[in-house]
Image (spheres, rainbow, N blue to C red):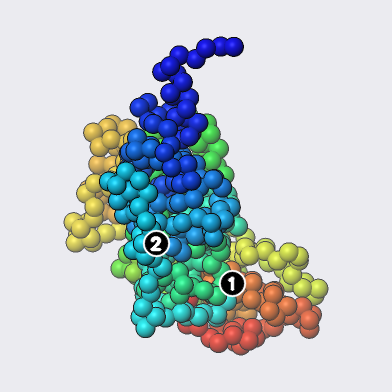
Amino acid sequence: MMLVPLKRRKLVLSKGNTGVDGGDIVAAKFPQVVLFLLERKMGASRRTFLSQLGRRKGFQVEEQFSKKVTHVICENNCAEDVRTWLASQGGEQAEVHLLDISWYTESMRAGHPVHMLDRHELQELQVDKSEVVVFSVPAYACQRRTTLENHNTTLTDALSLLAENAELSDEDGRGVAFRRAAAVLKVLPSAVKSTSQLTGLPCLGGHSLRVIKDVLENGSSSEVESTKGSEQYKALKVLTGIFGVGAKTADRWIREGIHDLRQLRDSGHALNRAQRAGLEHYDDINQPVSKTEAAAIEELVKKAVASVLPRAQVVMTGGFRRGKPSGHDVDFLITHPEEGREVGLLPKVLSWLQSKGFLLYQKTTRNSYLESKEGPGRPPSSMDRFERCLSIFKLLRTEKQAAEAPQDVMVNDVQAEGEQKSDESSRPEQTAAADRRWRAVRVDLVVSPISQFAFALLGWTGSKLFERELRRWAGYEKSMCLSSHALYDNNQRRYLRASSEEEIFAHLGLEYIPPSERNA
């Protein structure tokens, strides 16, 4: 039999009662009382200090929650929250006392467990029902009027960031779930004060509710803060900010050790034409486009179209049509009141713009849309097949605009990824951008036949989630197939024509919602 030295015997005894190395911790004096200190809102360092204090006083304090625990000690938590946490741990709630930290500190001073009074027990969350309104909203975003006004920006920003991270990580399903949850909160008439107000609302899954609860109780979401600080998220943001680079390409580069623009340049990667243009004009493209700048581009596009085809119509779509004060790019839909007259228009418009020096980059795709007597193919694609041009415009600035332009265009995410201001040699355009009289702007030109124009206008106005919900409503509720080209009724086996957005909403059995209220 191996002899254990006296000092070791004391330590083994202590560990047997507490589950941790205790040093000078004495054996448990009150074996019928097994304590567990909840770290939530208490903090790790304070929990460690209080746990060690309790063990020195002869209390049995467990590091991990288990069925042995008889008393859960909490700080700044309500009973409902702790019971929810306990349930997630498989705890037998009826046999566990939920106590405030005051009981613990009084027991420490007394040297033994004090009698439990009402004031020691965790209080139920008190909600003034006269101030709390339980919200109710329709299930689909296309049934709701969503303006730019938002009473819950802290919550929606948190969910939107998690949605963006999911999309950048090629997890579109999770991204849509967070987007739908944020869209519900955007339409609420007042700020959310308690998760109890959200009972029964659609699209609020368990993950989204946990994020909302965290923000309401702590002012921010730990998951969101962790995501913001993630090197993967930062790198994906920077690399997908390059025009022509998607999430999959960015992820591949990251796995190759490329996390910022300098590393991409030094890597010697062969970039396609779009990516080269995106890298060259990165700073301009990643600056918001103002409504004034969008209006200047609109005037330019209308002049170009009018010069090659009189009576052709140009409509600015996207976020600017919905009333947003700024955007990432500018989208235009072009048509002609006579069917077929729009054919061949786009090359002439681009030629005119090119001759005037307004195009820095352009890539066109031809119209590939064909209707079928049997209806759209299955599954229906959300992508349209119009003739279009993805371009980068050279927008001339007035003297006033040039003076007001940001002087250090590199103070952005790229700077945070290690591009130092002092390293001007690797970015000669960094200095020149502040002095030149123009900026690069992303512009999409889309040409639609007049017979499809109403559908194209609806599809290109957005928001992206609003359009997704319109298609979901059409499919699930009406057995129809909606795209930016047409609406097909699967029951009647025919296309439903429309000359306005109002007619499309009527076909779908929905109340018409104007563009300014489609900001889902």
Vertical order, 233 against 295 (above or below): above
The label nearer to you, 2 versus 1, is 2
Vertical order, 170 against 79 (above or below): above
Disc assigned to residue 122: 2
Decide which of tag 2 and tag 1 comes sooner along the chain.
Answer: 2
Disc assigned to residue 243: none
Could you tell me which residue is drawn at 43 percent across and 23 percent down? 10
Around disc 1, counting alpha carbons within 10 Å, would you say few (fewer than 14), some (14 to 19), or many (20 or more)?
A: some
Residue 139 x/y as whole percent:
57, 76
Element assignment for label 2: loop
| Residue sitting nearer the eye, 490 or 360 | 490
Could you tell me which residue is drawn at 23 percent across and 60 percent down? 401
Q: How many marks?
A: 2
Could you tell me which residue is drawn at 63 percent across and 65 percent down? 382
Q: Residue furthest top?
A: 2
Residue 460 x/y as whole percent:
52, 70
Element assignment for label 1: helix
Residue 334 x/y as whole percent:
51, 72
Can residue 323 be seen by looking at this rendering? no
Q: CA distance from mark 2 to mark 1?
A: 43 Å
Could you tell me which residue is drawn at 51 percent across and 79 percent down? 137
Quadrant occupied by the N terminus: top right
Disc assigned to residue 469: 1
